[in-house]
Amino acid sequence: MSDDRHVRRAGLIMELAAKFIRSETNSNPMITVTSVDLSPDMRHAIIFITTIPNEGEQEALIFLKRNGTEIRDYFKKHARMKQIPHLDFMIDAGERHRQQIDEIVKGLYPKE
C-alpha cells in the first residue's frame, strides 16, 4: 500500500512540475520533466529535466531553482498534499546519454 502511495505521489509531483514549467516558461529552451526521485519519507523530491537544445540546461536549472518557492505554491494550490516536499532540480544525464547512443546507432545503420 505504501509503495503505491509513493508512486502516485511521485507521479503527481512530475505532472504538476511539468504543468508549471509549461505555463511559466518560454519555449527556448524547451524543458521536459523526465522523472522524479521521491525520498522514502516523501519530504524531498528531485525533479529530473532535459532541455532542447542541450545548451540551455544551466539556464533552465537556474530558472527552476530561482522559482522553487513559486513551484511549491503552485503545488499547494493544485494538489491535496499535507506536506509539499522540498524540491531540487537536476539534469537527467541518463536521458541525454540515451539520446547520444540513438544518434550513434543511426549513424552506424543509415536508412536505405
Image (cartoon, helix red, strand yellow):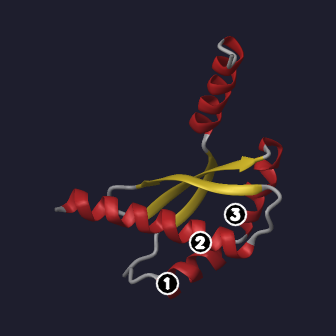
Q: Amino acid at mark 1?
A: His
Q: Which residue is mark 3?
A: 65
Q: Quadrant of the N terminus?
A: bottom left
Q: Amino acid at mark 2?
A: Lys
Dot 3 alpha-carbon crowd within 10 angstroms: few under 14, some 14 to 19, many 20 or more: some
Residue 54 horizontal/vertical position (percent): 77, 42
Q: Residue placed at 44% from the left, 81% from the top?
A: 79
Residue 83 horizontal/vertical position (percent): 40, 77
Question: Is residue 77 in view?
Answer: yes
Residue at the far bottom: name it. Answer: 77
Residue 26 horizontal/vertical position (percent): 80, 68
Q: Which residue is mark 2?
A: 19
How far separated are the C-alphas under marks 2 and 3? 16 Å
For the image shown, how many numbered marks are present on the structure? Answer: 3
Q: Amino acid at mark 3?
A: Lys
- Callout 2: helix, strand or loop? helix
Q: Quadrant of the C terminus?
A: top right
Q: Residue placed at 43% from the left, 68% from the top?
A: 12
Dot 1 alpha-carbon crowd within 10 angstroms: few under 14, some 14 to 19, many 20 or more: few
- Comes first in the chain, label 2 or label 3: 2
Q: Residue placed at 80% from the left, 55% from the top?
A: 29
- Callout 3: helix, strand or loop? helix
In the image, taking residue 90 as reference, residue 45 lies left or right, namely left
- Comes first in the chain, label 3 or label 1: 3
Q: Nearer the viewer, residue 76 or 86?
A: 76
Q: Which residue is mark 1?
A: 78
Q: Is the Cβ of the residue at disc 2 closer than 8 Å to that at disc 1?
A: yes
Q: Quadrant of residue 100?
A: top right
- Callout 1: helix, strand or loop? helix
- Comes first in the chain, label 2 or label 1: 2
How far separated are the C-alphas under marks 2 and 1? 10 Å
Q: Nearer the viewer, residue 105 or 89?
A: 105
